[in-house]
Amino acid sequence: MKRRQFIQNAGILGAGAMVSNWTFGGISLGNDFPLVRTPLEKRHFNSAAIEAAITEFKAKSKNKELGWLFENCFPNTLDTTVDFEMIDGKPDTYVITGDIDAMWLRDSSAQVWPYLAFCKKDEKLQQLIAGVINRQCKFIIKDPYANAFYKDENKVSEWKESDITDMKPGVHERKWEIDSLCYAIRLSHGYYKATGDKTPFDEHWLTAMKLIVKTFKEQQRFNGSGPYTFQRKTAWATDGVPMGGYGYPAKPNGLICSMFRPSDDATIYPYLIPSNCFAVVSLWKLAKMAETIFGDKAFANECNALAAQVEAAIFQHAVYNHPKFGKILAYEVDGYSSLNLMDDANIPSLLALPYLLGENMAQFNKGQAAPIIANTRKFVLSEYNPFFFKGKVAEGTGGPHIGLDMIWPMSIVMRGLTSNNDAEIKNCIDTLVKTHGGKGFMHESFHKDNPEKFTRSWFAWANTIFGEFIWKVYKERPHLI
């Protein structure tokens, strides 16, 4: 199944209406919401800690539809996408995205990330996430330039005949995306911080991490274009890389080239700024782990030096003085003064920078980044961003991946996660509740005027990050729930 999905028509219910008489599968459920969550006996994994959180939230939430959505969405990754086993005495967890039987490094990290906070209460859940880290390291060592993999190495990729690249057995897709490797670091650091468990961080893990740094340096392209090329025989312009598979020219300046965005769409200019920002904070985290766990000061210094080089290049080459918003960050640049001013809903995005930087925001650009990022947020959430759509039922960011007027719930979630304003956060919650198209789950995207017109009915990342947002609001701003 291709990553791009045709738009589906939910055909059940008008946007977010509270119902007095649900009919689902021909069965009237009276005043109850339809049972859409995977039945217990068919769930891939059950976490007592997550079930307790769902019970707690539903008991406290005044909005029954929101409680129903949380129950469906938050455990969706565990219910439907994880495949856990022990291999050679180590936990191993394969995580699909939902309707595509492949494991993306990005998606799998983001899908289990919200569960880290519950690991102390659930040893099996902790082991499951340790298994994701172990599986990701296997994939990175196999090919650090690939973005998605199969568990079965004998499975033939649907792209085998169309893609001109060094396709290895077990690789689903080989689109080079900086964020894929950043997410693996983020999950490892988040796991260590949440649990204190060093078990997954062995020599195999360190080998994968050093390969990540090597790959980042190759794609700075100070010494030629590097080993990676990618071309695809396709009618989709966003699926191929021009100039013999190396992309349009970029002037080496310390930034890292990324041929694809986190949407899996090709970049226009090779220096994708949200992903470079993500690389900086990821390298800081990796440096701390290398020194703390392994006492490897040389590798820690290498990570920090690379982070400093990328960080300096961001603020030298990617800051644009916008006539309305002042200094903002561009989405993409090429080092030759060309800029792409936009944002995309997929994460990392410009909107998501406070979320990804977290406690490191004060460190970023020596504490001088916050006003620039605040201005950038205003730009992203305005008509000046060509992929910010405003319609009859909602407003939010989309992107080229699905096309015009299609808002991604993920962008609404991210707007809420990066806001400190009660009214804005409440509006994000209300919008998400009224735009699930009657399905009880989040989707990849929906039309700005009609949430029943959506893509991907089973997209676990969107479901889980929705749960992450709602749980955060419940814990920090319970009066909004």
Image (spheres, rainbow, N blue to C red):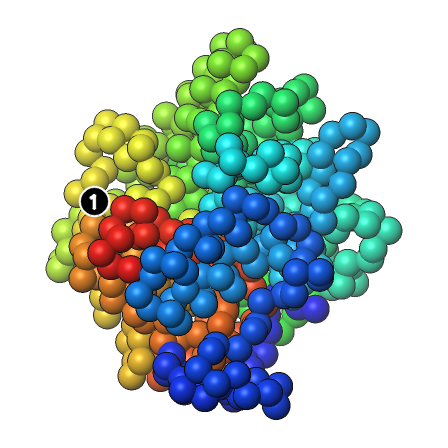
Q: Position of residue 335 (x, y in %)?
A: 37, 43
Above or below for 70 versus 228? below
Quadrant location, the N terminus: bottom right
Residue 134 screen position, x and y as percent: 67, 34
Q: Is residue 187 left or right of residue 168?
A: left
Residue at image point 58% right, 21% down = 198
Residue 174 visible in the snapshot: no
The answer to which quarter of the image holds residue 209 is top right
Query: At 44% across and 74% down in the image, what residue appears?
Result: 436
The image quadrant of residue 20 is bottom left
Mark 1 burial class by Cα count in 10 Å: few <14, some 14-19, many 20+ = some
On screen, residue 318 above or below 38: above
Q: Residue 466 appears at what percent x and percent y?
A: 43, 58
Q: Is residue 2 left or right of residue 401?
A: right
**In the foreground, 68 or 156:** 68
Q: Which residue is mark 1?
A: 372
The quarter of the image holding the C terminus is: bottom left
Toward which corner of the image does residue 354 lie, by quadrant?
Answer: top left
**Left or right position of 141 against 4:** right
Write the residue at 58% across / 67% down.
37
